[in-house]
Image: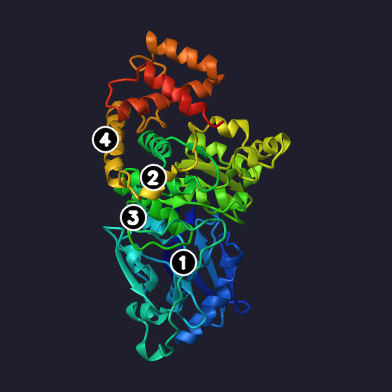
Amino acid sequence: MSLGVCHTVALNGLRGTCVRVEADVGGGLPGMILLGLPDASLGEARDRVRSAARNTGIALSPRRLTVNLVPAGLPKRGPAFDLAILVACLAAQAELGSPQDTVFLGELGLDGALRPVAGVLPCLLAAREAGFGRAVLPAGHAAEAALVPGLESVSYERAADVLADLGASQRLLEVAPLAPRSPEPEQGGAAPDAAGEGQVPDLAEVVGQPWGRYVLEVAAAGGHHLLLSGPPGAGKTMLAERLPGILPPLSDEDALLSACLRSVGGWGVRELVHTPPFLAPHHTSTTPSLVGGGSGVPRPGAASLAHGGVLFLDEAPEFAARTLDALREPLESGRLTLHRSGGSASYPAQFQLILAANPCPCGKPGRECECSALVRRRYWARLSGPLLDRIDLRAEVPAAQTEALVSGGWGEDSATVRARVTAARARQQRRWGPHGGVSNARVPGRVLREQPFAPSGREAAALRDAAALHGLTGRGVERVLRIAWSLADLAEAERPGPEHLEQAALLRGEAA
């Protein structure tokens, strides 16, 4: 029989599809033909597989090799198919057997080395869901594969070792390849914070900023987006960097999803990290690097890699206005759907956005400012009205209190604040869970306007007065309601009172 068959997984976004790799040895001019919508990098597998096979000791047949990737209508990209193509071709030549309950993933070096690839974790999850019981991977993915229970994973450094275990003659396997390299990140994504558990900076280090600390706690309690405005050196960045440390830890499900996004982004995964991720792209970042993109099937950007955590844009008005406005969709829906000529992909992007800005381009306080009114307007105009309307909290962060800095005192640490935030989130889960929400920032708007949660009496009058005083839009009124619920949760109140609504309105409109 001249037909060899094995299986692998194709990835589109976070969705994996099992692919049947068929290889046939037939007549005709020598060569290898790849069918099934391969992209350019997969098309180059013809030469990689031939060289790897020859340098491993078992050359591919000089006859015509036809390799078909089924389903043929599914676009396929990347070098992760190399190992499966090699196994299928050698099975077609009757050099070895190919188990049908196994998926093969890995890039081949010309010397036969197995090299890591991006997106292995969601591929393994898809293989397990499809009923496969075993996976063969490059050695660099051993730790990542251990995160998928119920699927036996075997890691190899060389293709020769894989072929030997599949029944190839040992006397033919002769060349020891070089050690595999670690995968390099692909374009289109920013590296997430690699800090492990417990390595987030502590909030106790932020002194002389009682107001900034309070606003940060409110943002953490309700999952609200936040704009921090203030002079350079006031502590805006310090506050933002400590937000993950006061957020509740990620659930196992969210930690696995975060790991899948890092895997697809090409950053590799060694363990499930329950600390919320923190992404801080530079203000020169392009739109694709922030929201995702690239040729072919689009890759996740910083907004998706920050899923479940914090996306911090320092010097926000220095970002391109078009880049900032690209965040409007995920701020509302919590997802990013990207369409390209090579296909479309949808990624989760439910993050807390923290913007930091100086009062003006020069950043000098008060009368020392050298900026004209026109320059100030142009500076803030990059933050469009629709984007600002989606930011729940807007806080002026004044210069830090000198006396507190000199005295060397410490404020509450992250663990103490996190306990209050976690208790507030638990109240929200109990209250909104039956209505499809998990936090005040994410509960459906209609729920807030229906009984028994809609404001009435004195609360409704306070909300109407705040809307008139601050010129709130319809979305702004809803945001004030959400903030008021967070203030009530921190105060352990049953529902927001007039004082919570008034405070929420101030927090909503302070730095606009």
On the image, which quarter does residue 125 sit in?
Answer: bottom left
* Residue identified by numbered label 2: 404
- Quadrant assignment for the N terminus: bottom left
Residue visible at 31% across and 30% down?
490
The x, y position of residue 158, in whole percent, is 40, 80
What's the residue type where badge 3 is placed? Val
Front position in the image: 430 or 236:
236
Mark nearest the camera among 4 and 1 is 4
* Residue identified by numbered label 4: 423
Residue visible at 36% across and 47% down?
203
N-terminal of the pair, mark 4 or mark 1, is 1
* Residue identified by numbered label 3: 273
Is residue 420 depicted above or below 94 in this figure?
above
Residue visible at 28% across and 38% down?
422
Q: CA distance from mark 2 to mark 4?
A: 29 Å
Is disc 4 placed on a helix, strand or loop?
Answer: helix
The x, y position of residue 148, in whole percent, is 31, 58
Tell me whether circle 2 and circle 1 mark residues in contact (CB < 8 Å).
Answer: no
Is disc 2 placed on a helix, strand or loop?
Answer: helix
What's the residue type where badge 1 is placed? Val
How many residues crowd around disc 3 within 10 Å: few (fewer than 14), some, or many (20 or more)?
many
